[in-house]
Amino acid sequence: MQDRERSVRRNMLLGVLDALDNVDRAVAHQETMDREGLQQVVRMLQWQLNEVLKNEGLSPVPTVGEPFDPYVHEAIEQVASNEYGEGTVVEEVRKGYRQGDETLRPARVKVSSGSRG
């Protein structure tokens, strides 16, 4: 059991290290990159880290357009909205993640108080 846990942790850390290697390469060549090149590197790193999380069984909490759920969402503000009904998530401020059925980190969201009058 301990060997399996160690192997899983090792594989996850190797994935993070691969992403960190790409960050190091980007920093080393930042002077030669234009804005588009830098954006491409950031998108690649985002994808790479999301793959590491997905392989660990993590999935993002659905937010915008979903009914507010205190088990997976943390409301930080209530805002008027003509687009979304009362109690519906209108904006994601910070991603939340689940691991299986467990909420690892709730999503920070803004929730509709209903129409603007």
Image: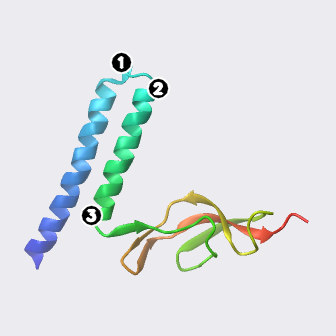
- List x then y, in percent, for residue 37: 40, 28
| Residue at the (84%, 67%) spot, across then down | 115
Q: Which residue is mark 3?
A: 55
Residue type at mark 1 is Thr
- Looking at the image, which residue is at 36% across and 24% down? 30
Mark-to-mark CA distance, 3 and 2:
30 Å
> Identity of the amino acid at label 3?
Asn
Label 2: how many Cα within 10 Å (few below 14, some 14–19, many 20+): few
Figure quadrant of the C terminus:
bottom right
The local crowd at label 3, few if under 14, some if 14 to 19, many if 20 or more residues have their Cα within 10 Å, is some
Element type where label 1 sits in the image: helix
Which amino acid, by three-letter code, is at mark 2? Answer: Arg
Badge 2 is on which residue? Answer: 35
Q: Quadrant of residue 41?
A: top left
Element under disc 2: helix
Q: Does residue 70 sit above or below 11 in this rendering? A: below
In three-dimensional space, the C-alpha distance between marks 1 and 2, rounded to whole angstroms, equals 10 Å
Q: Is residue 46 left or right of residue 66?
A: left
Find the residue positioned furthest to the top.
Answer: 32
Determine which residue is flagged by label 1: 32
Q: Earlier in the sequence, mark 3 or mark 2?
A: 2
Classed neighbour count for the residue bearing mark 1: other residues with Cα under 10 Å, few (<14), some (14–19), many (≥20): few
Q: Nearer the viewer, residue 94 or 90?
A: 90
Q: Quadrant of the N terminus?
A: bottom left
- Write the residue at 57% across / 67% down: 63
Spot occupied by residue 8 in the image (x, y as percentages of width and height): 17, 67
